[in-house]
Image (cartoon, rainbow, N blue to C red):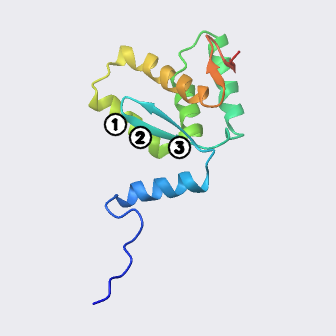
Amino acid sequence: MTQTAKPKGKGKSPAKRAKAAVAEASPDAKSYEWRGLTLDLPAEMPGELVFDFATFEEQAAEGQERVGSIIELLRSLVGEAQVRQIRAKIREDKITFEAVFEELEGILDGLLQQYGMGLGKSSASPSS
């Protein structure tokens, strides 16, 4: 009886094999780990992010809570599916309403750092 070659990556889940294939195809792809959740980022920041930053900065200048604009920035960076994963993790870890704003800012800051930027007191600015 002849043996056939086993598929490369046998034993890995289809999702892990797909993720590995994407990483091979785009070596500049970035990721960020938050509370055990790996968030995948595009190799380059999406252009539409500039509009979300404008809203974020306007709200900061007016002294408004910025949670809506933070979530929009997160959506632009990681997509709706990963924002749902963040939400599920917040629920799973029982993060309180009072603490969630700081957590979301922390996630956004960590994501921006993958591009050499950071979240300032009122806006995102290049890191020095």
**Quick one: 35 or 93, which is closer to the camera?**
35
**Whole-Å distance between the Cαs marked 3 and 2?**
9 Å
Is 38 on the left or on the right of 70, as rendered? left
Decide: marks 2, 1 in contact (CB < 8 A)? yes
Is 96 on the left or on the right of 59, as rendered? left
Is the residue marked by circle 3 packed among few (<14), some (14-19), or many (20+) residues within 10 Å? some
Residue 79 is tagged as: 3
Label 3 sits on a secondary structure element that is loop
- Residue 48, how many percent across, how many down? 69, 39
Decide: marks 3, 2 in contact (CB < 8 A)? no
Earlier along the polypeptide chain: callout 1 or callout 3? Answer: 3
The residue type indicated by label 2 comes to: Arg
**Whole-Å distance between the Cαs marked 2 and 1?**
6 Å
Q: Residue at x 66, y 17 (%)?
A: 123
Residue 84 is tagged as: 2
Disc tally is: 3
The residue type indicated by label 1 comes to: Ala
- Residue 17, how many percent across, how many down? 43, 58
Image quadrant holding the C terminus, namely top right
Earlier along the polypeptide chain: callout 3 or callout 2? Answer: 3
The residue at which mark 1 appears reads as 88
Is the residue marked by circle 2 packed among few (<14), some (14-19), or many (20+) residues within 10 Å? few
- Residue 127, how many percent across, how many down? 68, 18
Image quadrant holding the N terminus, namely bottom left
Q: Residue at x 47, y 24 (%)?
A: 104
Q: Residue at x 38, y 15 (%)?
A: 99
Q: Quadrant of residue 12?
A: bottom left
- Residue 34, how many percent across, how many down? 42, 29
Is the residue marked by circle 1 packed among few (<14), some (14-19), or many (20+) residues within 10 Å? few
Is 121 on the left or on the right of 20, as rendered? right
The residue type indicated by label 3 comes to: Gly
